[in-house]
Structures are given as C-alpha cells and as structure tokens.
Amino acid sequence: MPTETSTLTTQKTRNTKQLSSKLIRLLVYLSAVVTFGSLLFIILFILVRGVPYITPSLFEWNYTTDNVSLLPSLLTTLIVVGLSLLIATPIGVFTGFYLVEYADRGNKIVKAISMATDTLAAVPSIVYGLFGMLFFVTFLGFQYSVISGVLTAVIMVLPLIIRSTEEALLSVGMPLRQASFALGAGKLRTIFTVVLPVAMPGILSGVILASGRIVGETAALMYTLGTSTNLPTDLFSSGRTLALHMYVLSSEGLHVNEANATAVVLVVFVLVINALSTYLSKRLSKGGK
C-alpha cells in the first residue's frame, strides 16, 4: 500500500508538471503570435494607408505648401541621428566598460551611477525636451537648432547605451578573461581583443535601440530642434525630422494622406537602419574580429 500510494503521488506530480509545461508553452506561443500579429498588422495598416500617396513630389529638394516634400526632413533625420550617435556611442560604451571592467561594483558611487542610469532611462521624453529648451535653447542661447536637438538626444539615449553595454559585458564569461590574462595579455588588450568582439552584438543592439528612439522622437526634438521645413545649413539652423514632419502634417489636418506616406518612409528608414546595424554586428563579431 505505501508503495502504491507513493507511485500515485509521483504520477500526479509528473502529470501536474507536464500540464504546467504545456500551459507555459501555450502561453509562450500565444504571446509570440500576438506580438508578431500586432507588428504585422501595424506595418500592413501603414503600407495600405500610405503607399498610394507616395509620389515624386514628396521627394523634391525644396519644401512648399503644395508638395509638402519630406526630403529635407529625411536628410535632417540622418544628420540628427548620425551626430547624436557619434557623440553618445563612445561616451556610453566607455562608461559601460568602466562600470564593468574597472569600477568596484560595491562602491557607493558606482551604485549611485547605476541607479541614476536606470532612473534617467525611465524619464519621459517630454522632460528631456523641456530641459533641452530651458538649458540649450534659452540659457546657452543655441535657439531652435540642430545642436540643441542633438545634445538633447544624446542625453536621452546615453542611459540606454550604457545599460546595454553593461549587460553585454556582464554576459561575457570570466574564463575568457582569465584565459587571456594567462596568455600574458594585459587588461586593456583583453578588453579590446577578447571581451569587445564577444560583447559587440549586445552593444550594437543598444545602439540600434538608441537610433530607433531618436528617429521616432517628437516631443524632445520639437522643443529643441524646431519644426522648420528647410534643410539645416549649419549646426545652429532649425529643421524637422521625419517623425516631426509627420506629426505636423497630421496635426494640421490638411495633408493627412502625405502624413501617411511619410509614415511608410519612416518605417522603411527604421528597417534599413536595423538591417545595416545587424549586418555590421555580424561582421564585427565574426571570428572574434
């Protein structure tokens, strides 16, 4: 009898675990279907609403009230994203390296930096926009300009790059570092020749997310970059990104169809950036080079 009771208990436990496993697997599949289904629906909705209104006039060099060209906004987006990443990426990556490879994790200052990074990553973009307007536009006198928008975007995406770099570096196993040290490599050489190639995909993932946030940003750039329809001639000229261009056209209510067409171009632009970043990530991490 005790043996039969034990067998029944074991069988019930096994059945319960199998049921739980099947339920969890079902939830995982359901979550994947909902996620990809929502993404596919959004993309198809944008394409259906916008593709019919993509005309050559949308890509004319000069913006007018007749053609509402998005080309100046597209070029401004490239400028803002490029300059922002050019400044934010080295600072964020090197900060992540310091926090993981050199700093004492138990130090109160390091803990304060980590807490500040997490807090800043959760701050709404409108707060960054108001800060940029008060500090860069008004206090420093940069006015509505590319430099004001770029510096605001840098502050906005730095926590994201720092945190992604930290996570990527922490995912690299200690045996790799120890093997490099055992072969006579120094700290700096180990970081750049052993740790960095392995962590590169994770670091670039953070950079991709940062670029996507800049591309889709409106509130922070509206109060710093401005909404000028002209292509900026220098760092102290105003302009508008694609997201701002689409927002302004939609809010005016006069060129909603052109706004939908701009949304299509914006989606394609983001997909191209992600594809290029993924390709670079694979090339840089291939073979540890």
Image: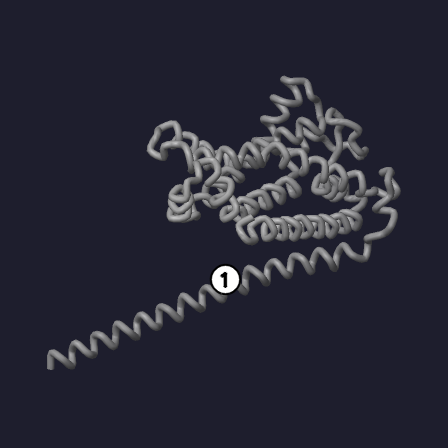
Does 110 sit above or below residue 7?
A: above
Q: Residue furthest left?
A: 1
Q: Quadrant of the N terminus?
A: bottom left
| Residue 178 in which image quadrant | top left
| Residue 214 in which image quadrant | top right
The residue shown at (43%, 47%) is 172
Return the x and y of residue 193 as percentages of the image width and height: 51, 43
Left or right position of 141 against 208: right
Left or right position of 49 against 207: right
Residue density around tag 1, few if under 14, some if 14–19, many if 20 or more, within 10 Å: few
Does 275 sit above or below residue 250?
A: below
Q: Amino acid type of disc 1?
A: Ser
Left or right position of 135 against 111: right
Front-lying residue, 133 or 98: 98
Circle 1 SS class? helix
Does 22 sit above or below residue 259?
A: below
The residue shown at (85%, 38%) is 63
Which of the colour schemes (rainbow, by chain, secondary structure, one colour) is used? one colour
Return the x and y of residue 152 as percentages of the image width and height: 61, 30
Return the x and y of residue 239 as percentages of the image width and height: 75, 32
Front-lying residue, 216 or 103: 103
Per the image, the residue denoted by label 1 is 31
Answer yes or no: is residue 123 visible: no
Front-lying residue, 74 or 132: 74
Answer yes or no: is residue 76 visible: yes
Return the x and y of residue 141 as percentages of the image width and height: 68, 18
Left or right position of 3 against 192: left
